Image: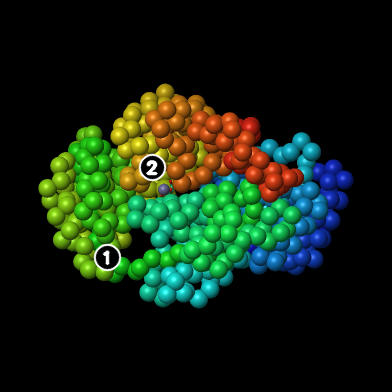
């Protein structure tokens, strides 16, 4: 139903509202219709439903209206109308977020403020690629795949890539400071945003898209807004860095006898193979699951206690020799499947890129949404973290499926069939904090981890962040509950 064109009528505004709030929502719908047109103000419950549940099915809330602006000016008009009607605003684009930050809260305000989902998908314009500056301007609703294809058509590439590329958008990736597989070479989204345009809660447009590589003129909006998860402003457009397009590529799936050997190998590769583009770790539980899901045998086998590494190298000249020189003498390498052939590379990379899909399918099969914890710890603490995560999974009786981005010590701890997600989170996130790590490496805090934010941020730090938030959003309209260390836990699994 998503995207269906529906005219606004008072009869189509439903829900459990009293007459007064129904009037407010009706007035707001009319104001939004005047601003962006009736075709883009969606009110029927069955149409809104497609925007109200997250990708995993774990987070769900209710909204009153979905507004679909197509430009920064329209976003400004929408937010102005929302402020005039005291509405809360949830910005959403691809809705691939994993911490409940892009859907409404499960519990509504006691004072029942209207809730508007602002869908950013129509802001999907792409400017001409500036090949000299190696930059491009992209609307927040542009998918990562379109951003990448556009860059490649001009002989350049995008520095950020991850498996949800066909649906995830530039705006969401900035809002969560997304990472993915190329972080070890190019950094996270934060390093790619050289200009930004955004709309604050009162409809003001802030930022600049000039993309000047050097400018010191006060606060840097890209730095402040990247990772702010829709709480400070709604990002509408970004000026983004591009990187060279390397046509000589090689992929290796390596089986190693231990996690320690994998960590050592990544160190060697980072020091000696400058073309290293990705070093993704896949633990046997994840490899077994994805192999069954793909119905495809894994070409190499890790022994008991071993792990798999998916390596990608990309350069202007063939990186095969330098990769072989590093892999050959490496301790703990049991076996490796290496290929430069495009189709074979895609088949190898499937074992990494389709783990999330396999985890989702396994969760559906047991009738419970996946419980995901995205965390990072120093590399020498990974073993300890895994012990704690396995212990928590064993106590719960669920299945732990770990994989991640090894160079950053970033593990995605997926729990299939978790009965007590809060208890798992409590054990794992406390351990992460005491190991010197972070409770969110790249998925964000959302509502999922807000109750644990205090583990990694001091009270004075949280107070200063709250002050900045209040200054930009005095009526607490933007994504309430998200990134809010004082928020109530809001993680009820969806039970169908
Ligand atoms: C990934 O690395 O594939 C993403 O972060 C998604 C996930 O954790 O499932
Ligand atoms: Zn990831």
Q: Tell whether circle 1 marks a residue whose Cβ is less than 8 angstroms from ligand 1.
A: no
Residue at disc 1, secondary structure: strand
Which one is in front, 17 or 113?
113
The residue tagged 1 is: 315
Say left or right for 324 vs 413. Answer: left
Farthest residue toward the top?
395
Is 33 drawn above or below residue 287 in the view shown?
below
State how many labels appear: 2
In the rendered image, residue 15, in percent from the top left (x then y), is placed at 77, 46
In the rendered image, residue 353, in percent from the top left (x then y), is placed at 37, 53
The residue that appears at 59% across and 36% down in the rendered structure is: 462
Cα–Cα gap, marks 2 and 1: 25 Å
Is 317 drawn above or below residue 178 in the view shown?
below
Q: Tell whether circle 2 marks a residue whose Cβ is less than 8 angstroms from ligand 2.
A: yes
The residue tagged 2 is: 410
The residue that appears at 26% across and 69% down in the rendered structure is: 316
């Amino acid at each position: 139903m998503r995207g269906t064109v529906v005219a606004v009528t008072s009869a189509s505004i439903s829900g459990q509202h009293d007459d007064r709030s129904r009037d407010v929502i009706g007035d707001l719908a009319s104001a939004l219709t005047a601003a962006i047109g009736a075709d883009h103000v969606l009110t029927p419950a069955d149409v809104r439903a497609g925007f109200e549940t997250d990708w995993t099915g774990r987070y769900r809330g209710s909204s009153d209206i979905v507004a679909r602006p197509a430009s920064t000016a329209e976003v400004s008009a929408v937010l102005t109308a929302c402020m005039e009607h005291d509405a809360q605003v949830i910005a959403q684009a691809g809705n691939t977020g994993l911490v409940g930050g892009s859907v409404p809260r499960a519990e509504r305000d006691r004072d029942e403020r209207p809730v508007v989902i602002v869908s950013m998908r129509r802001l999907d314009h792409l400017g001409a690629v500036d090949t000299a500056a190696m930059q491009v301007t992209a609307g927040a609703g542009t998918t990562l795949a379109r951003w990448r294809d556009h860059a490649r058509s001009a002989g350049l590439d995008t520095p950020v890539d991850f498996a949800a590329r066909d649906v995830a958008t530039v705006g969401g990736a900035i809002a969560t400071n997304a990472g993915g597989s190329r972080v070890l070479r190019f950094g996270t989204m934060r390093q790619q945003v050289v200009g930004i345009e955004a709309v604050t809660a009162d409809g003001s447009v802030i930022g600049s898209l000039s993309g000047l590589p050097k400018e010191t003129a006060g606060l840097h909006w890209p730095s402040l807004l990247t990772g702010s998860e829709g709480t400070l402003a709604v990002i509408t457009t970004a000026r983004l860095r591009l990187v060279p397009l390397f046509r000589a590529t090689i992929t290796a799936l390596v089986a190693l006898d231990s996690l320690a050997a994998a960590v050592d190998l990544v160190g060697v590769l980072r020091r000696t193979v400058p073309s290293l583009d990705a070093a993704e770790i896949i633990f046997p539980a994840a490899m077994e699951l994805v192999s069954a899901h793909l119905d495809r045998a894994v070409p190499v086998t890790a022994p008991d206690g071993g792990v798999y590494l998916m390596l990608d190298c990309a350069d202007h000249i063939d990186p095969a020799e330098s990769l072989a020189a590093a892999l050959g003498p490496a301790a703990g390498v049991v076996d490796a499947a290496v290929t430069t052939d495009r189709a074979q590379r895609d088949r190898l990379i499937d074992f990494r890129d389709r783990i999330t899909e396999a985890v989702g399918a396994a969760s559906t099969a047991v009738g419970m949404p996946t419980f995901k914890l995205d965390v990072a710890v120093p590399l020498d603490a990974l073993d300890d973290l895994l012990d704690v995560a396995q212990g928590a999974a064993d106590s719960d009786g669920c299945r732990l499926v770990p994989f991640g981005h090894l160079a950053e010590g970033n593990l995605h701890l997926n729990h299939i069939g978790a009965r007590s997600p809060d208890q798992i989170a409590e054990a794992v996130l406390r351990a992460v904090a005491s190991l010197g790590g972070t409770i969110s490496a790249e998925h964000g805090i959302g509502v999922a981890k807000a109750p644990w934010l205090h583990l990694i941020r001091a009270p004075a730090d949280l107070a200063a962040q709250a002050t900045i938030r209040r200054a930009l959003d005095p009526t607490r309209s933007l994504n309430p509950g998200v990134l809010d260390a004082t928020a109530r836990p809001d993680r009820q699994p969806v039970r169908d």
